Image (cartoon, coloured by chain):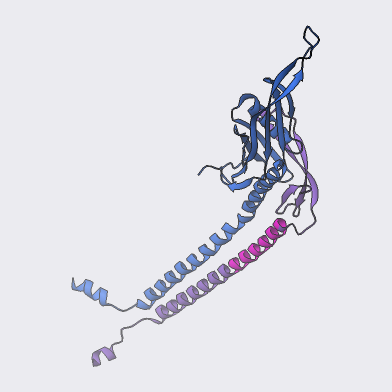
Amino acid sequence: MMKKLRSSKGETLIEALVSVLIVALSSVILATMVAVSSDITEKAKANTDELYIKISDVTRKTDAPTEGKITITGTGAQASIIPEEFVVNYYGEENELTAYERKGS
Amino acid sequence: MSAMKNKLKDQRGVSVVIALLFFLFCAVIGSIILASAASNAGRLSHMEQEQQAYLTTSSAATMIQQSVNGMKFKAVAENGVEKSMTLPAGDWSSYIGLLAEKVYADDTEQTATFEIAATDMEVISGKMTMDTDYNVSVVLNQKNNPEQYKMTIKISAEAKKNEVSHRRERGPDDAYGNPTYREIEILTTTAKWGIGEVEKGDGTL
């Protein structure tokens, strides 16, 4: 027991410092990864909320519609049918989610 | 052998090993958290495109459903000879009318294919089928992605095929100046389409 206590075997100061450095670095990396993940999740949540608002606006037709046309073209054996244009109401912003419905429905 | 045992029991330098294990643990946990967050964000980025694809197909489906609702077809034949035909009117009437005319003439199922192009939207391909009872089924899908967002509109028809009635028509007078009459058989076929139902998929289960 006394021999053990008097033993000078152990770790050098360099080893101890390197260990502390590695632990500190690991903690910083983990904390950064968690923070970045949290940020990504927050942004994704915000985007999802925004998308649901857009979907709601388009499906509930809350905004004033824009009059437009759709074209029906026959294909295959019906290719000879002259393409027809029907007037429709478009809902939603340009380059955003858009839906349409038959005008007057 | 004893040298190996000593090596295994040797505790010098163990703090570095423990620190490296901690580093590994942090790296693994951090990577898992980061990967799951990135995968979640990636999945959501496709949501808008998918939602637009759904809106494009469902808009086309609803438009056809509303356009066909209330359309009528009537064909009358007298003594086996076609006398008159009243085709549907309004949007989509050229397709419904074409198919109804062919079903009436051939008494076989008929199909028509078409494409719907709307401003800033994917082109929708459609296949309209009318059975011998004038029931209409329309399968819609994205032209560039046929397996995604398939929708089927099933529109039942109230059809009365070849209803028989008769009428007497005055013919030429006989040799004594008496009027003669002939019986004419009238076959009337009518079809009227209702609002129909929109289903997901191509209608086959």
Q: Is residue A48 magenta?
A: yes
Give coordinates of residue B201: x percent, y percent: 56, 45
Give me the residue at 69% from left, 39% from top. B116
Q: What residue lies at 71% left-to-right and 45% top-to-bottom?
A: B66
Q: Residue A62: x and y, percent? A: 76, 59
Residue at 75% of width from left, 53% of height from top? A91
Whether B69 is among the magenta residues is no
Q: How far across and how far down the image is residue A75, in percent? A: 66, 31
Q: Which SS does the magenta portion mostly show?
A: helix
Q: Is residue B116 above or below residue B11?
A: above
Residue B128 x %, y %: 63, 36
Q: Nearer the viewer, residue B21 or B126?
A: B126
The stretch of residues the image draws in magenta is A39-59
Q: Check the image and report above or below for B193 versus B189.
A: below
Q: Nearer the viewer, residue B157 or B77?
A: B77
Q: Residue furthest left?
A: B1
In this rendering, would A66 be left or right of B54? right
Q: In the image, is B53 to the left or to the right of A103? A: left
Q: Please identify which colour was used for chain A in the image.
A: purple
The one nearer the camera, A42 or B136, is: B136
**Placement of B186 over or under B124, stated as above or below:** above
Q: Residue B63 occupies which quadrant of the picture? A: top right
Quadrant where the image shows the N terminus of chain B: bottom left
Res A97 → quadrant? bottom right
- Of residues B96 and B151, the one nearer the viewer is B96
Q: Which residue is most to the bottom?
A: A2
Rendered blue, the chain in question is B
Is the residue A80 above or below the residue B71 in the image? above
